[in-house]
Amino acid sequence: MPLPPTVGILGTAAFVPPRVVTNNQAGASAGIDDAWIFARTAIRTRRWAGPEQATSDLAVQAAEQALANTAINAGQLGAIIVSTSTPDQPQPPTAAFVQNALHANSAYAFDTNAVCSGFLFAINTAHALAQRDSIHVLVSGADVYSRILDPTDRKTVCLFGDGAGAVVVGPTTASSRHLRIVDTELHTFTQHINLIGVPGGGSRQHLTTATLDAGQHYFHMDGRGVRDFVTTTVPEQVRKFLARHHLAVEDIDHVVMHQANGRMLDEIYSLLDLRNATCHQTIDRFGNTGSASIPITLHHAYPELHGNILCIGFGGGMAAGITLLAAASGSAGDVGAHK
């Protein structure tokens, strides 16, 4: 039996809506301003979608650019995976709208939802599919959180932005330049399931006048509980992951972490003693873009990437994911004509 192909990320892309929302604008209804928000989050601006833009619209923009950057056309795709917790509608999957817009007629399409860590769950799935079937898989992390924010909730309204990132995952060759997917490890710690969620709109609490009046259709978060979970659990899981691969923190060249809160990211970097790694951030200008934050940040870091790259995600569930990438055949920035 032949060995399965080596699989990697062949190219990346990102798209954010053109509308820039300042801290003063985001926090106006919650009674908070730029100084209050920046001191607690390190965010200056974020992008919010226009009224005509849905999650799939952002994902399509990122997907088209990712395909262009890898010189692969939509007809060559075997699968499309969209990671989102803000789908266009409950059904069909957002990925189906993306497939339709791309005219990717040979692909099958489905969504994954692990909230803000979902992109790494999707990468793990794409890795397995590409390795088993030798196909190219488009993976997009896309969210429009501005639609589910309570404008009066100071804990959440200032954190989130809208956006999409996309990558093409597929078999690599010895001469190709890519980010080899070394391994992904996923966890869900359901004892913390109530820290993050949108209670209304599903089969447990369908939308009624009462649930709408109670704000159950909005995103809810226990900020202190999330911080305690992330700063305790994430560093522990990263250390275990590195040990399993016989790596030290000093062996990591780049870190791309879910852009949850800039102050919390700094705390995690310090806890892991990531002094030798370049820790990439986009939260200052894009905010927390949910499942899009890792692929957006990965794309903006792409020209600089070399050596070992650690992607770290965490989100509702509470879920956590870690993916180790290795830049192959020189700098990853040589892949395609990245824009």
Image (cartoon, grey):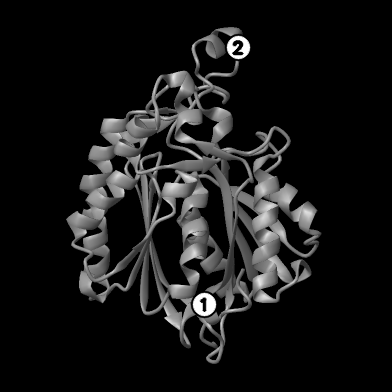
Please give the label number shown on residue 208: 2
| Rendering quarter of residue 130 | bottom right
The percent coordinates of residue 320 (x first, y second) are 36, 50
Q: Residue at x 52, y 67 (%)?
A: 128
Instruction: Locate the C terminus by quadrant.
Output: bottom right
Q: Residue pushed farthest bottom?
A: 175
Q: Is 5 displayed left or right of 79 in the figure? A: left
Instruction: Locate the N terminus by quadrant.
Output: bottom right
Residue 114 visible? The answer is no
The percent coordinates of residue 66 (x first, y second) are 64, 66
Viewer-proximal residue among 334 and 175: 334
Q: Residue at x 71, y 74 (%)?
A: 72
The answer for how far apart the CA atoms under marks 1 and 2 are is: 50 Å
Pointer 1 residue: 333
- For the image shown, how many numbered marks are present on the structure? 2
Q: Is 36 displayed left or right of 232 in the figure? A: right
**Mark 1: amino acid:** Gly
**Mark 2: amino acid:** Thr
Please give the label number shown on residue 252: none
Q: Residue at x 28, y 45 (%)?
A: 264
Viewer-proximal residue among 19 and 289: 19
Secondary structure type for disc 1: helix
Pointer 1 and pointer 2: residues touching (CB < 8 Å)? no
Up/down of 17 relative to 245, above or below: above
The percent coordinates of residue 221 (x first, y second) are 38, 29
Q: Residue at x 44, y 79 (%)?
A: 327
| Rendering quarter of residue 15 | bottom right
Q: Nearer the viewer, mark 1 or mark 2?
A: 1
Query: What crowding class fits label 1: few (fewer than 14 Cα within 10 Å), some (14-19), or many (20 or more)?
Result: many
Secondary structure type for disc 2: loop
Up/down of 101 relative to 172, above or below: above
Q: Is 227 displayed left or right of 300 in the figure? A: left
